[in-house]
Amino acid sequence: MLHKTKAIVLNHIKYGETSIIVNMYTEAFGIQSYIENGVRKAKARNKIALFQPLTLLDLVVYKKSNASLNRISEIKCNQPYQQIPYEIIKSTIGIFLAEVLSSILREEEESNPRLFSFLESSLISFDQQQSAYQNFHLSLLLQLSSYLGFYPSGAEEVLEELRPFQTFRLDALQEKKFNQLLTEDNGGELKLTGEERSLFLKIILNFYQLHSHSIKEVKSLKVLREVLH
């Protein structure tokens, strides 16, 4: 049976000589995996660029109950990015977020239109931002926690929950900045040093690991830190 849905590409892996398996977060079905045959051929009907991380797609898909892999009937780019694939800071943040979201959303196997809309609108806004976007990933992960059921009231709560496992120390100004990230969309105009940004991200990832055991080592983290420093 055919269904229409929006989707956000998370990652893809090679399959056979010319095909790929694409992992996506869909508006209609949550996390789904699709096999796309022949996409790595020179004259492929659908270009591999459509399956780059965080690409926003409109799909017509086949959906079989209990199938781990489904197929795509029709595909088009919903909102072509103007900056994310081409600007080094944005592309690096995008790769990092795609990797983290692949872990975080692994258990989201049902439709959640509010969560999908939040991610879609946040990514579009991120692409359109002309400045002050270096904190976007911090703000997005904190805001995302509200859709996953563990949004903290403030820095004090986060540090208290983490204390039995690892102690983090924030001075009064850093605590104020962290609380601003919780309340301002896309990180706003908040001024952070590279060290503060790195520290806040470490705290946020540890907080996620406490509440979502699917997050393990983030391979793109090292490159992200180098670029943002």
Image (cartoon, helix red, strand yellow):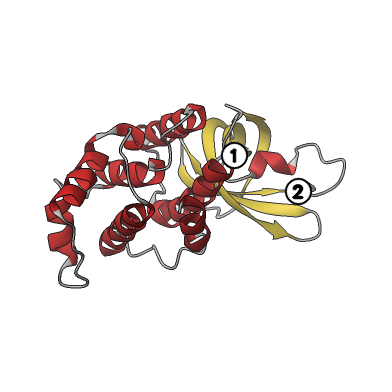
Tell me what residue is drawn at x 29 percent, y 46 percent. Answer: 142
Q: Amino acid at mark 2?
A: Asn
Q: In the rendered view, would you say 36 is above or below 161?
A: above
Q: Disc 2 designates what residue?
A: 37
Quadrant for residue 116, please give it. Answer: top left
Q: Residues within 10 Å of mark 1 (few under 14, many from 20)?
A: few
Camera sees residue 9: no
Q: Disc 1 designates what residue?
A: 87
Residue 140 rendering spot, x and y as whole percentages: 36, 42
Looking at the rendered image, the disc whose residue lies closer to the viewer, 1 or 2, is 1
Q: Is residue 40 left or right of residue 2?
A: right
Q: Distance of mark 1 from mark 2, alpha carbons?
A: 30 Å
Nearest to N terminus: mark 1 or mark 2: 2
User: In the picture, which quadrant includes the N terminus?
Assistant: top right
Q: Residues within 10 Å of mark 2 (few under 14, many from 20)?
A: some
Residue 194 rendering spot, x and y as whole percentages: 38, 53
Tell me what residue is drawn at x 32 percent, y 46 percent. Answer: 192
In depth, the one of 2 and 94 nearer the eye is: 94
Query: Is disc 2 placed on a helix, strand or loop?
Result: loop
Q: In the rendered view, would you say 84 is above or below 222?
A: above
In depth, the one of 153 and 115 nearer the eye is: 153
Residue 122 rendering spot, x and y as whole percentages: 41, 33
Q: Is residue 162 left or right of residue 229?
A: left
Say whether marks 1 and 2 touch (CB < 8 Å).
no
Camera sees residue 14: yes
Q: Amino acid at mark 1?
A: Glu
